[in-house]
Amino acid sequence: MTGDDLRLDHITFYVTDLAAEADRLRRGYGLEPYAESTAWGCRSVAVGAGLVRFVLTQPTTGDHPGAAYLGTHGDGVADVALGVADATAAFRAAVNRGARPVSPPCARDGFVTATVQGVGDLAHTFVQRPEGLDERALPGFTPTPATAGGLDAGLAEVDHLAVCVPSGELGATVDFYRHVLDFQLIFSERITVGDQAMTTEVVKSGSVTLTLIEPDASKEPGHIDEFLAAHGGAGVQHLAMSTVDITAAVDTTGAGGVEFLPTPATYYDLLPDRVGRVKYPLRELRRRSILVDEDHDGQLYQIFARSAHPRGTFFFELIERLGARSFGSGNIAALYQAVELQRANHRDARTEAAA
């Protein structure tokens, strides 16, 4: 197994209400159902658009592993499946390097799959696909008829997944992905905003990119700490889906019921001093609360959906890259500065009103 062999095959979510979640993703993001399965202890539906492929699995018995996952974490990402040329060899190599085996190699419908444990309760299934088969096909799944009237949000692929780990566990997590699964460390940064701080390290292999985030326990608790507490440990905090026109994607998904986090108006007042010429008119970015960041390679545009999770944990991100290879860390400080400026303006307004 080499890092260049890996590709993102699909992502499995454990969910408490399969029908409701499939409907929400179809209406909001245009992720159409295309296959289904009824296996031991669970029901599953595969949904997708472009290269975005999710498997939604609802346990139907208490002894299915998804039941324990849902009891601890609620709905969430349970498995990031990795496409490989030889699943048996990849599994053996990972286990020999220290990965904990979950499911040994199994052949079905021309596929070979095998699973190891990743960080926390996140698993990784190696998927070896038969040649010449529909690239969306899955072992044990039956294709379903296409539905009419779905929206097209222009989603292309999964850009990255952000995984939060408790303070003190980032180093071991990075080592696992580098030395056990052959990922490469491509980016590392410590981010400090006010009294909070966190460290981000990004690992990549082929088309699979994981942003690993650890809070600084010596600083004030922030949203990473809140996620870890609400989620019940390490896990996928958010998943970014790419598009070539983020304004159109925001309009389409918004019309489908997706709510996005608002951005302070002061963020856009400060934007011209922080980035160069942008692709979209500033008023259009402001109206949609789209964020902008840039690095030496170009710009990126991103927006975060409001979490629909009962615990307020997992959420989606939409992202458009114009050459940029980073992950929007500049927006963290920029948003903090904008919020502080907004607070100062409110204080000044209250002072003037009281005078």
Image: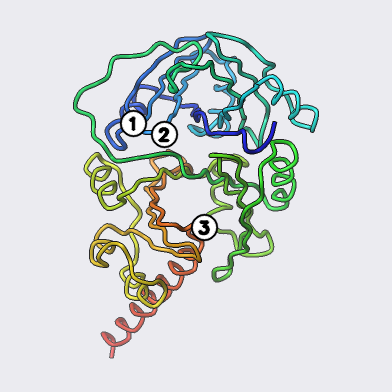
* Rendered image coloring scheme: rainbow
**Which disc is residue 326 wearing?**
3
211 versus 78 height, above or below? below
- With 141 as the anchor, is 25 left or right in this view? left
Type of the residue with mark 3 = Ser
**Which disc is residue 23 wearing?**
none
- With 85 as the anchor, is 301 left or right in this view? left
**Which disc is residue 31 wearing?**
1
Labels 3 and 1: the sequence-earlier one: 1
The quarter holding residue 252 reads top left
Which of the pair 74/331 is nearer the observer? 331
Q: CA distance from mark 1 to mark 2?
A: 8 Å
Judged from this view, the residue extending furthest toward the front is 132
Q: CA distance from mark 2 to mark 3?
A: 21 Å
Residues under numbered marks 1 and 2 in contact, where contact means CB atoms less than 8 Å apart? yes
Q: Residues within 10 Å of mark 1 (few under 14, many from 20)?
A: many
Across and down, in percent, residue 121 comes to 63, 32
Kind of element beneath mark 1: loop
